[in-house]
Amino acid sequence: MKITLNRINNDYHFQLKNERGHIVELDSRAEFGGNDLAPSPMEFLLMGVAGCSAIDVISILKKQRQEITSYKTEVEGIREQIEDAKPFKDITVTIFLEGNINEEKALKAAQLSFEKYCSVSKTLEPTAKINYKVVLNNKEI
């Protein structure tokens, strides 16, 4: 896996491309000298958690023939100062599912994602506590 980064402006606005040609932009927030034109690197980490777990959960539920009519995730990260860095200390993932989905299967799919399959959360696991909850048809389970 390889990513290429190219600087777009004289500050911290970058364009990144993967080996398959997909492009995303990245920037720093204004208070840190950027122009806030795109997500920050730390926001991309949270987006990675959301995307990775979504792929897992949907894949698991589809294999179990569960009918998903809507899927949404919210990810919140809490950071802590450690010397000069501010890594994530706690990450909370809330999965919002709608459809004809068995509660136990929804919870098991989330558990399998975060405890076994999601490479992004497994990468962050040594330094950040990752909590998750599932809201099925507007009811937390």
Image: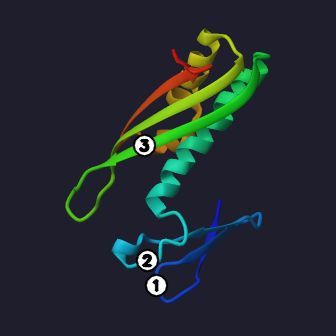
Q: Is residue 128 left or right of residue 18?
A: left
Residue closer to the observer: 125 or 29: 29
Percent x, y of residue 36: 48, 71
Quadrant of the rendered structure where residue 22 is? bottom right
Q: Give whichever of discs 3 and 1 has the lower sequence position.
A: 1
> Dot 2: few (<14), some (14–19), or many (≥20) neighbours within 10 Å?
some
Q: Give whichever of discs 2 and 3 has the lower sequence position.
A: 2
Percent x, y of residue 96: 59, 29
Provide the secondary structure element on which disc 2 rests: loop
Measure how far apart labels 2 and 3 are at the Cα level: 22 Å
Residue located beneath label 2 in the image: 34
Residue under the image location 56 percent in, 42 percent down: 50
Total residue callouts:
3
Residue located beneath label 1 in the image: 11
Vertical position of residue 78 compared to residue 62: above or below: below
Q: Give whichever of discs 1 and 2 has the lower sequence position.
A: 1
Amino acid residing under circle 2: Gly
Measure how far apart labels 3 and 1 are at the Cα level: 27 Å
Provide the secondary structure element on which disc 3 rests: strand
Do labels 1 and 2 touch, CB within 8 Å? yes
Residue under the image location 47 percent in, 77 percent down: 35
Residue located beneath label 3 in the image: 76
Provide the secondary structure element on which disc 1 rests: loop
> Dot 3: few (<14), some (14–19), or many (≥20) neighbours within 10 Å?
some
